[in-house]
Amino acid sequence: MGNPHLGPIPGSRQKSGTRAFPVTAMTRTIPPIRAIAARTRATVAVRALACFLNLVLAVVSMNSRRFTVGSRGSVIVVNVPDAQRQLVLQRFLARGFRAWAAESGRVALQQAREQRPDVILMDMDRPTLDGWESTRRLKADPVTRHILVVALSEDTQTDKRNQAMRVGCDGFEAKPIDVEHLVACVENLLPAQGV
């Protein structure tokens, strides 16, 4: 009798020459087409969302850019390797901090003067104006001396911790970075600062 999704049009018998043939047309929307269209729209929406999230992650991973999300305080992550830096930034952003990265101690000093963050997470083991010299300069400058500095180092011996405190660090965290512990450390430092 024909396709169940197609029905005859009233007066569907038309003559072609001497032979009559039935003319059928779509009298209703075919449900599978609706489902396909809905899936296509959903797929496009998911792909657009994925592209947006990839863009956000690309922006977050860029060095020396500021990202404002919350108002719990502001944090600069300095000299931390890419994979860890992204994780640290994402965690601080998720916890309501404003967070951004600086690719070197020199960039961090400039950003500290311009942006006045609450906390700087300083990797002490990297070259290009290492964390030790960057911290000395931060603490010697009247504009930036109030900024809290947390030292990040692979060397966890007591003398390194003491050296970090002597140059002006307010906290010390071992690498590889335990992100949850690092966030808790910063949260514990900030109330004392009045943020």
Image (cartoon, helix red, strand yellow):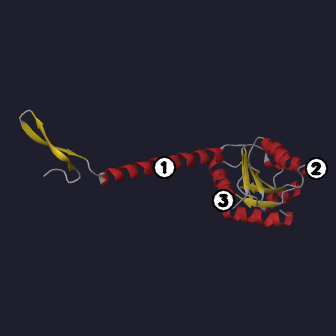
Q: Amino acid at mark 3?
A: Ala
Q: Residue at x 29, y 52 (%)?
A: 30
Is residue 178 shown to the viewer in this render? no
Q: Amino acid at mark 1?
A: Ala
Please state if 151 lies on the left or on the right of 33 as rendered. right
Please state if 174 lies on the left or on the right of 136 as rendered. left
Please name the residue that numbered disc 1 is placed on: 45
Total of numbered circles in the picture? 3
Q: Nearer the viewer, residue 195 or 26?
A: 26
Q: Nearer the viewer, mark 2 or mark 1?
A: 1
Q: Nearer the viewer, residue 158 or 190?
A: 190
3D distance between C-alphas at marks 2 and 1: 51 Å
Q: Nearer the viewer, residue 180 or 67?
A: 67
Please name the residue that numbered disc 2 is placed on: 142
Disc 2 crowd, CA 10 A, few/some/many (<14, 14-19, 20+): few
Extreme residue toward the right, this view: 142
Q: Residue at x 77, y 40 (%)?
A: 128
| Residue 162 location (% of width, % of height) | 84, 60
| Residue 118 location (% of width, % of height) | 82, 56
Q: Residue at x 89, y 55 (%)?
A: 146
Secondary element at image label 2: loop
Q: Nearer the viewer, residue 38 or 136?
A: 38
| Residue 185 location (% of width, % of height) | 75, 64
Residue 139 higher or lower than 16, as above or below: below
Discs 2, 1 touching: Cβ within 8 Å:
no
N-terminal of the pair, mark 3 or mark 1, is: 1
Secondary element at image label 3: helix
Please name the residue that numbered disc 3 is placed on: 94
Q: Amino acid at mark 2?
A: Pro
Q: Nearer the viewer, mark 3 or mark 1?
A: 1
N-terminal of the pair, mark 2 or mark 1, is: 1
Extreme residue toward the front, this view: 11
